[in-house]
Image: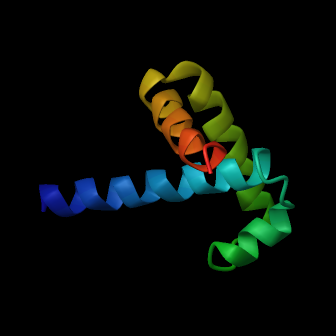
Amino acid sequence: MLKVERIRQEILTSCKITIYLLGIDAGMTYASIGRMMGDLHASSVGRVLKKVALENIQNRKTHKEIDEIRKIYTEI
């Protein structure tokens, strides 16, 4: 059960970071991101984006993950 929970948490973190990058770097609207991520409401996308932005500042691991992803698509 512990392994399943860890995988679930990693998937959620990946989705949150994807929402953050689509909003901040790609400049997509909350509604567009919501449709893309499985019909999330725009206000939910906004809340996730705000939480990840704060976490990006406070959590070194999250900041590192976001930077690594950014390096991939800025080198292309």
Q: Where's residue 22, x and y in %?
A: 72, 55
Q: Residue at x 78, y 53 (%)?
A: 26
Q: Is residue 33 above or below residue 47?
A: below
Q: Position of residue 7 (x, y in %)?
A: 27, 59
Residue at 69% across, 72% down = 40
Who is closer to the viewer here, 7 or 2?
Answer: 7
| Left-right relation of 48 to 68 | right
Q: Is residue 65 left or right of residue 43?
A: left
Q: Position of residue 51 (x, y in %)?
A: 64, 39
Q: x, y percentage for residue 58?
A: 55, 20
Relative to 71, 47 lies left or right: right
The coloring applied to the image is rainbow
Q: Nearer the viewer, residue 51 or 56?
A: 56
Please tell me which residue is depicted at 59% across the width and 55% down the height of the picture: 18
Count of numbered marks: 0
Q: Nearer the viewer, residue 75 or 59?
A: 75
Q: Residue furthest front?
A: 76
Check the image and report above or below for 17 versus 60.
below
Q: Is residue 28 left or right of residue 44?
A: right
